[in-house]
Amino acid sequence: AHGRLGARFVLYENPFCTRKVSELLITQLSTCCEMIGINCTCFSVEGRHFSCRSPQERKIWLRAISNIKVKLHHRAPLPSEQDLADYRLSVCECIKVLETSCVLPIMDPLLPRLQ
């Protein structure tokens, strides 16, 4: 969801988005950075650390978050349903390219979630 003050970054348990785990509010001032390392797949948003399946996937996440921050900074209007569909299609196309260029196994988390 996206509003004038920020956008909710909702985290789900799995790709089916049936169970919400947490959420963050992304604002134009939110900190977002990538971790440095050879083939590093980690990044952080507002002090919360995330790990991707590949450096290329990390790039997609960071680009999407950066795009949200730019839209908030310029007070862009709320996206229409068509805009959201277009954004999702663009991300899906990037993911398809990734899947054909490298193997991205779907794995359960290595550590159990804290309650």
Image (cartoon, helix red, strand yellow):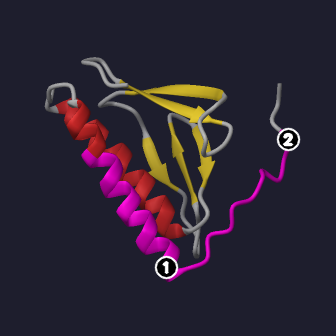
SS type, badge 1: helix
Q: Is residue 49 magenta?
A: no
Cα distance between the residues tagged 1 and 2:
30 Å
Specify whether 114 is left or right of 97: right
Rendered view: 68 above or below 105? above
Assign the C terminus to one quadrant of the image. top right
Q: Which mark is residue 112?
A: 2
In the foreground, 2 or 26: 2
Q: What amino acid is found at the position of numbered circle 2 in the picture?
A: Pro
Residue 4 in the image, given as x and y percentages of width and height: 24, 18
Residue 97 in the image, given as x and y percentages of width and height: 41, 73
Q: Which residue is mark 1?
A: 100
Rendered view: 52 above or below 87? below
Q: What amino acid is found at the position of numbered circle 1 in the picture?
A: Thr
SS type, badge 2: loop
Q: Quadrant of residue 73?
A: top left
The number of callouts visible is 2
Rendered view: 88 above or below 83? below
Rendered view: 14 above or below 63? above
Q: Which residue in the rendered view is the most extreme toward the bottom?
A: 101
**Magenta residues, start to end:** 86-112
Q: How many residues crowd around disc 2 within 10 Å: few (fewer than 14), some, or many (20 or more)?
A: few
Image point 58% across, 76% down: which residue?
Answer: 38
Residue 35 in the image, given as x and y percentages of width and height: 55, 58
Q: Quadrant of residue 91?
A: bottom left
Residue 90 in the image, given as x and y percentages of width and height: 30, 56
Q: Which mark is residue 85?
A: none
Image point 58% across, 34% down: which residue?
Answer: 11
